[in-house]
Image (cartoon, rainbow, N blue to C red):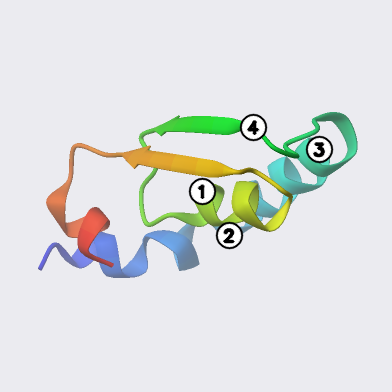
Amino acid sequence: MNRYAELYDELSAKPYEKMGRFLARNVRFSGKRILCLASGTGVYPEFYLNHGARHVTGVDISPDFLRL
């Protein structure tokens, strides 16, 4: 398994937190269908679902990220 896939969320947690706060304040996901490109390990797709998205499709070039 790609060692970066295992550490990705931990190494980039701060940008996710900041972007998550911005999105939660400014975007309504309720009932939306979302295509998440470069979805990595699924942090953003999970965020969208937790904030009311009806469906999220995640796409990433790395099979290791998609396996997590």
Give how far apart the Cα atoms at labels 2 and 1 are: 15 Å
- Label 3, on which residue? 22
Q: Residues within 10 Å of mark 3 (few under 14, many from 20)?
A: few
Q: Which residue is mark 4?
A: 32
Question: Residue 56, relative to residue 51: is it above or below?
Answer: above
Q: Toward which corner of the image does residue 31 lie, by quadrant?
A: top right
Question: Viewer-proximal residue, 31 or 43?
Answer: 31
For marks 4 and 3, give the CA distance. 18 Å
4 or 3: tag closer to the N-terminus: 3
Q: Is residue 30 above or below residue 3?
A: above
How many angstroms separate mark 4 from mark 1 (CA)? 12 Å
Task: Tell me which amino acid carries mark 4.
Answer: Lys
Q: Is residue 15 left or right of residue 64?
A: right
The amino acid on which the numbered mark 3 sits, given as a three-letter code, is Phe
Residue 8 percent coordinates (x, y): 38, 59
**Quadrant hosting residue 7:** bottom left
The quarter of the image holding the N terminus is bottom left
Q: Earlier in the sequence, mark 4 or mark 1?
A: 4
Q: Position of residue 9 (x, y in %)?
A: 46, 62
